[in-house]
Amino acid sequence: MGVLPRNGNAYRFAPIKTNAEGDSNEAVPENFDARERWPECSSLLGSIKDQSNCGSCWAVSAASVFSDRLCIATGGAVARNLSAEQLNTCCYRCGHGCDGGSPEAAWYFFRRHGIVTGGEYQSGEGCQPYSIYPCGKGRNTCIDNDPDTPECTIKTCTNSNYKKDYRADLHYVDTVYSLKSEEDIMTDIYKYGPVQAAFYVYTDFMYYKTGVYSYTRGQIEGGHAIKILGWGVENGTKYWLCANSWSRSWGENGLFRILRGNDECHIEDRVIAGMPHVPKRSN
């Protein structure tokens, strides 16, 4: 697993945001899917990544959530994947790349250094696309079961066909925050888009196929970071709708649903997001 504990990380805590801080108390719906609310960004919102056997979930999910929120904040004008590759390889304060990192530190990297565009392995998209061969059929089906973290490429694009200047391609966030209550998480997603969450993975989660997951058996495999893009209720059971990064061959076409409202596997304890910087247009 790829999420490091908060202990010892300089960015282990982000300020807690509540509904009272700038958000109205507008009621959220019983069922919600960000892909339906923002159709102009649906291709990003519904994108399922493949982190391969690199423990880069912290970077992949952070870059995905930032991509979604940037698209939403610009009304679909900036609908590009941001680079999990750059974050995984160049954020030294985040942790250890493929050996795990800090979701909180990832967002502070966005705020301080910015991040360029990216894309999937051999996609030819963006400035720094993902460079690790994908698993394709779910976790633990990769050619390389223990890939090294690729080298950081500084101030230049690794995609020679991408013509935009590196500095001009950087995107930033203005604020970084965490969310602690079920209501605050739902309100933030409803208003601004998906959030990143870290939780404990148990053995039974590895074999999830469908339905609303709750822990039943197995040992802790480690910490994992994912994207929450919605919620719902099935047969009276509340759940979060989440995107994993183990390819579309895993779970519900790459998605999963997990019990909501009781901090299942601590999924409501470490929720992080940020507000993208959107330059003001000159008249």
Image (cartoon, rainbow, N blue to C red):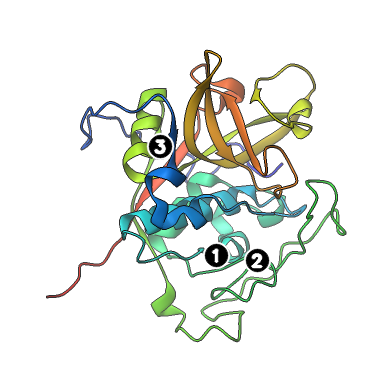
Q: Residues within 10 Å of mark 3 (few under 14, many from 20)?
A: many
Which residue occupies 38% across, 44% down? 37
Q: Position of residue 48 (x, y in %)?
A: 62, 51
Q: Position of residue 99 (x, y in %)?
A: 72, 51
Q: Nearer the viewer, residue 270 or 45?
A: 45
Side of 76 where 144 appears, left or right: right
Nearest to the eye among marks 1 and 3: give it. Answer: 1
Q: Nearer the viewer, residue 26 or 113?
A: 26
Nearest to the eye among marks 2 and 3: give it. Answer: 2
Q: Amino acid at mark 2?
A: Tyr
Question: Helix, strand, or loop for circle 3?
Answer: strand
Q: Position of residue 46 (x, y in %)?
A: 54, 50
4 vs 75: above or below: above
Side of 120 where 182 appears, left or right: left
Q: In whole angstroms, how far apart are the C-alphas of marks 2 and 3?
A: 27 Å
Q: Amino acid at mark 3?
A: Ser
User: Which residue was labeled with disc 3?
Assistant: 178
Side of 165 where 264 appears, left or right: right
Asked whether disc 2 touches disc 3, contact meaning CB atoms under 8 Å apart, the reply is no
Q: Nearer the viewer, residue 186 or 252?
A: 252
User: Which residue was labeled with disc 1?
Assistant: 83
Task: First in sequence, mark 2 or 3: give its number.
Answer: 2
Asked whether disc 2 touches disc 1, contact meaning CB atoms under 8 Å apart, the reply is yes
Asked whether disc 1 touches disc 3, contact meaning CB atoms under 8 Å apart, the reply is no
Which residue occupies 59% across, 67% down? 119
Side of 198 where 232 appears, left or right: left
Q: In whole angstroms, how far apart are the C-alphas of marks 2 and 1?
A: 7 Å
User: Which residue was labeled with disc 2?
Assistant: 130
Task: First in sequence, mark 1 or 3: give its number.
Answer: 1
Question: Helix, strand, or loop for circle 1?
Answer: loop
Q: In whole angstroms, how far apart are the C-alphas of marks 1 and 3?
A: 22 Å
